């Protein structure tokens, strides 16, 4: 069996490309969980975080920063992996249902488009500081913060490689 088409189908390069899938999930009353990030070099911390996020609902949607967005946020030396590689890696995870790229500095517009039932970010945020908090709260959804896995970060991995 050729798995690549199945994996690629989980990637939306614009929010509009995900519209039909999201509509179907809402119709079926799936509980949509949303998180976002650069996910530049996928590591154990990411996997544990995403697996926990996925367990909070029935569908996990990841908002993925485009290359241009990562460069604005992290500097000219980033990303290490381009958006196509990062999207493919994330989409290949069994518990990831959709990866949607976004080019803005925050995922606010994407969160408004997805209308998730659960918004998840790392434990370094207070819930009310999370972009999209007001959108999700207004629809009766929940905001969850998850602890990071100690000793794992993309920045520390890059420093180690130098």
Image (spheres, rainbow, N blue to C red):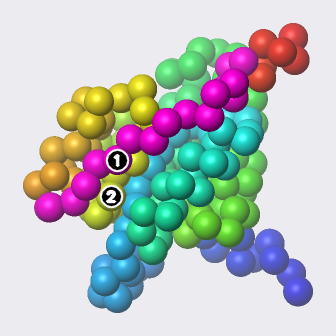
Query: Front-most of 90 and 102?
Result: 90
Question: Which quadrant would residue 46 be assigned to in this image?
Answer: top right
Where residue 57 sits in the image (x, y, percent)?
Answer: 42, 68
Relative to 63, 2 lies left or right: right
Is residue 79 visible in the rendered image? The answer is no
N-terminal label among 2 and 1: 2
Q: Residue at x 31, y 83 (%)?
A: 29
Question: Which quadrant would residue 25 be assigned to in this image?
Answer: bottom left
Magenta stretch: residue 143 in it? yes
Is residue 54 visible in the rendered image? The answer is yes
**Which quarter shows the C terminus?**
top right
Label 2 sits on residue: 118
Q: Residue at x 75, y 29 (%)?
A: 80
Graded by Cα atoms within 10 Å as few (under 14), some (14 to 19) or many (20 or more), the crowding at tag 2 reads many
Q: Residue at x 22, y 59 (%)?
A: 141
Establish if 9 lies above or below 115: below
Q: Disc 2 vs disc 1: Cβ atoms closer than 8 Å?
A: yes
Q: Secondary structure at mark 1?
A: strand
The residue lying furthest to the left in this view is 138
Label 2 vs label 1: CA separation? 7 Å
Where residue 130 sits in the image (x, y, percent)?
Answer: 29, 35
Label 1 sits on residue: 144
Where residue 70 sits in the image (x, y, percent)?
Answer: 56, 29
Q: Residue at x 72, y 63 (%)?
A: 92
Query: Front-most of 95 and 146?
Result: 146
Relative to 108, 66 lies left or right: right
Establish if 38 lies above or below 2: above
Q: Secondary structure at mark 2?
A: strand
Q: Which mark is residue 91?
A: none
Relative to 85, 98 lies left or right: left
In the rendered structure, which segment of residues is drawn in magenta? 139-156
């Amino acid at each position: 069996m050729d798995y690549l088409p199945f994996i690629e189908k989980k990637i939306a390069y614009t929010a509009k490309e995900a519209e039909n899938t999201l509509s179907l999930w809402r119709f079926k009353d799936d509980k949509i969980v949303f998180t976002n990030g650069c996910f530049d070099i996928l590591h154990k911390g990411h996997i544990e975080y995403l697996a926990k996020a996925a367990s909070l609902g029935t569908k996990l949607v990841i908002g993925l920063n485009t290359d241009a967005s990562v460069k604005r946020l992290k500097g000219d030396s980033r990303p290490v992996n381009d958006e196509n590689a990062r999207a493919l890696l994330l989409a290949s995870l069994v518990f990831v249902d959709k990866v949607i790229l976004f080019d803005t500095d925050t995922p606010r517009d994407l969160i408004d488009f997805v209308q998730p039932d659960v918004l998840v970010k790392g434990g370094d945020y207070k819930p009310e500081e999370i972009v999209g908090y007001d959108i999700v709260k207004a629809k009766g959804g929940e905001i969850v913060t998850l602890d990071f896995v100690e000793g794992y970060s993309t920045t520390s991995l890059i420093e180690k490689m130098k």
